[in-house]
Image (spheres, grey):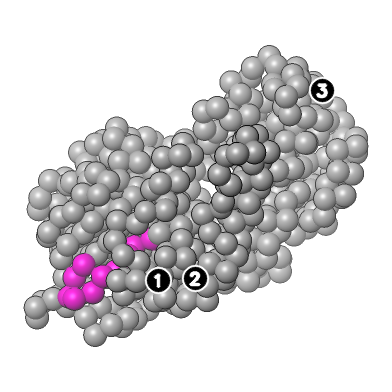
Amino acid sequence: MKITFCGAAGEVTGSQHLIECGGLKILLDCGLFQGSRAECRAKNERFLYKPDDLDAVILSHAHIDHCGNLPSLYRQGYRGPVYCTDATADVTNIMLEDSLKIQLEDARYLEKRLPKSAPRVKPLYEEKDVRGIVNRIESQPYDKWVQLFSALRIRFRDAGHILGSAITELEFEEKGTIRRLVFTGDLGRRNIPLLRDPATVGGCDVLISESTYGDRIHPPTSDIKAALLRIIRAAVEQEGKVIIPAFSLGRTQQVVYFLNELTNSGQLPAVPIYVDSPLSLRITELYRKHVTTSLDAEVQQTLTADADPFGFEHLRYIASQPESMELNRQSGPFVLIASSGMCESGRIVHHLKNTVSDPKNTIVIIGFQAENTLGRRIVERRPYLKIFDRDYPLNARVEILNGLSAHADAEDFKWWYECLAERSGVGQAFLVHGEARAAQALSGILKDYCDEDPIIPQFRQSFEV
Ligand SMILES: [Zn+2]
């Protein structure tokens, strides 16, 4: 078996690993590299293999750093199947459309700022490439072995990371022996709202494990619901607004679910709650569609008394632009959940512009905010925030609620590796999808369960195992 690391090696974007075994060429994930524009453009355009040589693509989940470059693969000649879970198929469709929209907006923005003589800025791919690859998706349920080729069968197990996310077990037949490979995709956590705990799987010859937070212990999630209740009650008393920037995929549905529970238990004050994002609405529809097959036992319990855990009396999803603009003029109290998560683009920026200067209002930060984003400047409680080229004083309260991370921490990994090792151990492990410090820390944990020391591969590196 030969493995080539074509992305997410020593970094967290561009997940892409090529497996050659049993006469097959299988690509695990085809994610977009995200970061500095010029460098990423080159990496996203130039694959390290010929796309039409691949026999199949296996997709772990629908985050853009795992699925976002699939249309480029189609554009460059790939016409084979893409295998993923049923929910991932639906979410990928929406996420790729959104990715194309963002690229078109970016291209327009850049073109306005470049000299007329500069070459035209083009998105990586077009609508026909998105449609082309989406039509190649062949979805599979969780927990069922599927024979993809005579020399390969696979099984998806729940990774507990986002809706539809999967750990993939691959069993290749090579020269009369079975070679077993396990790919974690992005591994989720135990005991987080909505999602099942990551499934534990049996040992393997080769493990490819993510390592994003391999050097961290997350704070517990249990007090987030209580914190939301406290913040909303205080806002109602002061007639203030509560603004929650949240990613459309995953985080928004978790917050809505908490608010739904608080409503069911009669604790939440009767205050209007808005989810202002067409993308969040479309993804929430998929949470509803896959609620029984892809969400956890607690949600199933909720369903026995409440047919819709993502809707309640005072909640409204806002799709149209005029309605969103109307909210800018509405006085408090109300709660507003809007994308994007790092406050850099979309409707949230307008809402923040209208709320940050009033001390009655509260901004609730519930997710990671990267450097050089408006979200990070809010977390740092800068006295002034630059929004649309104007400075606004930050007088609103800022509440930071950690603990909703969708990635396993060091303790989750240790638990998951222990389960893996209990059932026949690991031959060779590779740690991907993490920065050097995280991968090295995790290597220290993982090595106890492996025959060989884990390898932290670099971009373009290949290994025979
Ligand atoms: Zn992910």
The residue positioned 79% from the left and 47% from the top of the image is: 273
**Outermost residue to the bottom:** 150
Query: Which element carries disc 3, helix, strand or loop?
Result: loop
User: Are circles 2 and 1 on residues that touch, CB within 8 Å?
Assistant: yes
Q: For this rendering, which residue is in front, 461 or 201?
A: 461
Left or right: residue 234 compared with residue 15: right
Instruction: Give above or below for 22 relative to 367.
Output: below
Image position of 206 (left or right of 12): left
Quadrant of the image occupied by residue 339: top right
Residue under label 3: 358
Q: Decide if residue 157 is in sight here.
A: no
User: Residue placed at 18% from the left, 54% from the top?
Assistant: 462
Front-most of residues 199 and 126 = 126
Task: Determine the residue located farthest toward the top in the rendered image.
Answer: 383
Task: Identify which amino acid the numbered label 1 is placed on.
Answer: Tyr
Q: Position of residue 133 (x, y in %)?
A: 49, 70
The prevailing secondary structure element of the residues shown in magenta is strand
Report if the CB atoms under discs 2 and 3 are less than 8 Å apart.
Answer: no
For residue 78, the mark is 1
The verdict on residue 25 being magenta is yes
Give the distance between the C-alpha atoms of the residues marked 2 and 3, in whole angstroms: 47 Å
**First in sequence: mark 2 vs mark 3:** 2
What are the residue bounds of the magenta stretch?
A: 20-29
119 horizontally vs 451: left or right:
right
Q: Which mark is residue 133?
A: 2
Q: Left of 234 or right of it: where is 441?
A: left
